[in-house]
Every structure is written in C-alpha cells, then in structure tokens.
Amino acid sequence: MIPVTYYLVLSAVLFLVGATGVLIRRNAIIVLMGIELMLNGANLSFVAFARQFGMADGHIYVFLVITVAAAEVAIGLALVILLFRNRGTVNIDEVRSLRW
Amino acid sequence: MELYFFLFFAIVAVASSVAMILQRNPIYCVLLLIMVMISIAGLYLMLDAQFVAIIQIVVYAGAIMVLFLFVIMLLNLSREEGGVFRIQKPLAVLLAALLFLPVAAMIMSYTGGGTTTPADGGGAGFGEVEQIGTLLFTKYLLPVEIAAVLLLIAIVGAVVLTRKGTVSVGE
C-alpha cells in the first residue's frame, strides 16, 4: 500500500502547477483550466484521506467539488464569451477597466 | 507493483500538467488537461474510489473539458498571447516554489495519528456506489440539494449571460 504522504505530495505539486498556470498565462480560458487543475489537486487529497481513515465522506466532498467546478466553468466560459463579444479579446492583460 | 502504477500515473499527471501551462495552443492545453484527469482517475481507482473515478472521467474529462473545447473552437483562438510584464513569469514560478515550502513542511510533519498507511481497505464495499448513495441521501442530503440549486443557477446564469441583446457592456 502506498503511504498517503505520497498522494499528498503529488496533490500539492498538481495544485502548485495549477497556481503557476493561473499566474503566468494571459489567456482567460487557460486561467480557468489552471483553476480546474488546482481543484483536482485538492480532490486527490480528499480521496487519499478518505482511504486512510476508511470513511467515504471524502468521496462526497469530491462529488460536491466537481459539482461546484461544473457550475464555475459554465459561468466562467459564459463570461469569456461575453468578454470576447464585447472586447474582441480574451487576454486578461487587456481587460483593465476596473483597475484604478 | 502498486508503487510502479502510482509512479506511472503521478509522472504522467505532473508531466502533462507542466506541459499544459507551457503549451501555446489552447486545443493542446485541453487535451493535456484531459490526460491529467485520466491519470488522476487511475489514482482514484488505486485508492478504492471507484465511483469518484468514474465521475472524474465522465464529468470532468467528458463534460467539462468538452465545454472548454467548444468555447475555444467557437472563439477560434489560435493567436499567440503576449505578456505585458516580462518579469511576471519568473516571479510567478518563484512564488509557486515559495508556496511549496510550507506545504512540503506540513506534509512531512504529518503523521496521520500514528500511521500513514491504512491496514485494511475500510471494509467491504468501500467507495462503491451503494455506500456513496447511502451517504448522499442521508447524512449529506442538504448539501446535495444545495448543489442541485447551484447547478440550476449556473444553467440559468450561463443562458442569461450569453443571450444576445440583453447584456451590453460598454457601447
């Protein structure tokens, strides 16, 4: 049996790769995909802990996280389409109307 | 044997995710992210989470990533993206590496209440549909209902947002 620590390290690495993607990419769609990667890293921790403690509650949390991710992607991509329609770009550096 | 499977899935997941954030073509990004999802589903199977593994493939790799593909093809994005701040990329990588330090320290100090390796598999039927379903409709009934309402709100919101002629930003 693999120690749960290995899964935690992998989950942290995936989360940080996702966070790096959110920080370095300028395409709004890729930024959303980075957020998906971070959510997946967190989900892996939930499932690893569920296995360790023998309780399936962690699986329920993953289920709910996936639900929230689906809702977030639907709204986020609708906003991206709206942005493209109004501005003709999805580059988040060019969208700065709310910046002081 | 199990360790080899773990290493295989872990390396595929990390390599695909790193390639994803470096890839210029958005379509390849989506395909690489699907590879990450599928290797994570393999890891879920190793953790006796069959239901979550299937949900991962059907909902994440199947539905959510197809939504991404639709939008990318709809917007016809193939142009190169240029960054405004040249220093931003090394700075972001540095910040992520710094963030890794406390996380790694926390993981290394985690003892899991004596053992980090479960002796038994949590009993027969662990992670199967029957157990998940029982939990969903007894202990977690209210969160499930809230999730249902959230999905409804997301559907209505997406339709309202993308309808032509109702929302006009600028102009």
Image: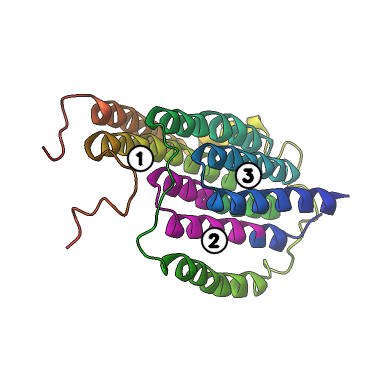
Question: Mark 2 — residue?
Answer: A16
Local packing at callout 1 (Cα closer than 10 Å; few below 14, some 14-19, many 20+) is some
Mark 3 and mark 2: Cα distance apart in space: 14 Å
Q: Quadrant of residue B105?
A: bottom right
Q: Mark 3 lies on which chain?
A: B
Residue A19 magenta-drawn? Answer: yes
From the image, which quarter does the C terminus of chain A lie in? bottom left
In the rendered image, the vertical position of residue A32 relative to residue A81, given as above or below: below
Q: B147 or B45: nearer the eye?
A: B45
Residue A9 magenta-drawn? Answer: no
What is the secondary structure assignment of the residue under circle 1? Answer: helix
Is any part of residue A99 visible from this angle?
Answer: yes
As drawn, is B21 to the left or to the right of A29? right
Mark 1 and mark 3: Cα distance apart in space: 21 Å
Residue at left 40%, top 52%? A26
Q: Kindly identify the amino acid type of the residue bearing the numbered disc 2.
A: Leu
Q: Which chain carries label 1?
A: A
Mark 1 and mark 2: Cα distance apart in space: 21 Å
Residue at left 30%, top 32%? B153
As drawn, is B112 to the left or to the right of A34? right
Q: B122 or A5: nearer the eye?
A: A5
Residue at left 64%, top 30%? B130
Q: Kindly identify the amino acid type of the residue bearing the numbered disc 1.
A: Gly
Q: Mark 2 lies on which chain?
A: A
Report if the CB atoms under discs 1 and 2 are less than 8 Å apart: no
Instruction: Report x, y in % for residue B146.
Output: 37, 36
Question: Mark 3 — residue?
Answer: B36
Instruction: Report x, y in % for residue B67.
Output: 46, 30
Question: Mark 1 — residue?
Answer: A76
What span is colored magenta in the figure?
A10-39
To the question of a shared chain for discs 1 and 2, the answer is: yes
Q: Kindly identify the amino acid type of the residue bearing the numbered disc 3.
A: Val
